[in-house]
Image (cartoon, helix red, strand yellow):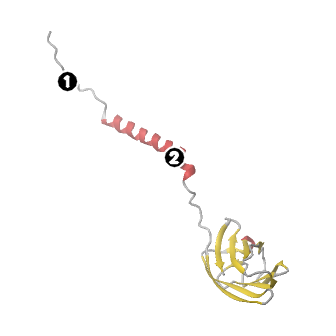
Amino acid sequence: MNLQLKPRDKAVSPIIATVLLVAITVSLVASAFTLLHNYVPNSGPLPPTATVEVENMTTITNSVTGNYSLTVSQITQNVSFRNVDVVVQFQNGSIYTVSIANDRTSVYEITVNPNLNITVISDTIYLNPGTVMVFSLHKAPSFVSRISLIDSQTDSNIVSAFF
């Protein structure tokens, strides 16, 4: 018995091999994307951020009286006052959230409660550099500990000032 091996020249063509390799790669990438796309954060527009200067001009006798002044010095994008909520937190834990919702320019006053008024001073209907907010306290039970401006469209914090 004489067995001899004969070489065969029949193999897969390089072109077919390349096509198969690309098809397998595409199907693996598509499967991975389908499984993982919910875990990748959406790269939408960035929320607005601002820089502010604050001044505390309050005094205390039997209660807190005076003003906190917040002046916007920089902001990354225009935000309409209609989309700005103001959050005021007092040291006693009380938190008040108020929408500015202003279509007017110049001076606009909001009464939050009998102890707190907010006066917005701006030359446009947008929160922009130069916008001043004065938080007036009249016989308040405690000092303000934090003031935050929130973009209600993106529900993101524009800026927070701590006292």
- The quadrant where residue 107 appears: bottom right
The tag on residue 116 is: none
Residue at the extreme right: 114
- Please state the horizontal and vertical placement of residue 110, each as a whole percent of the image: 81, 79
Residue ID for mark 1: 7
Graded by Cα atoms within 10 Å as few (under 14), some (14 to 19) or many (20 or more), the crowding at tag 2 reads: few
Residues 61 and 72: in front is 61
Q: Quadrant of the N terminus?
A: top left
Residue shown at the point (56%, 60%) measured from the top left:
43
Q: Is residue 92 left or right of residue 31?
A: right
Q: Is residue 108 left or right of residue 129?
A: right
Residues 106 and 139: in front is 139
- Please state the horizontal and vertical placement of residue 69, each as a whole percent of the image: 70, 86
- The quadrant where residue 105 appears: bottom right
Comparing labels 2 and 1, the label whose residue is closer to the camera: 2
- Please state the horizontal and vertical placement of residue 87, each as a whole percent of the image: 73, 73
Please state which amino acid type lies under the numbered disc 1. Pro
Residue ID for mark 2: 33
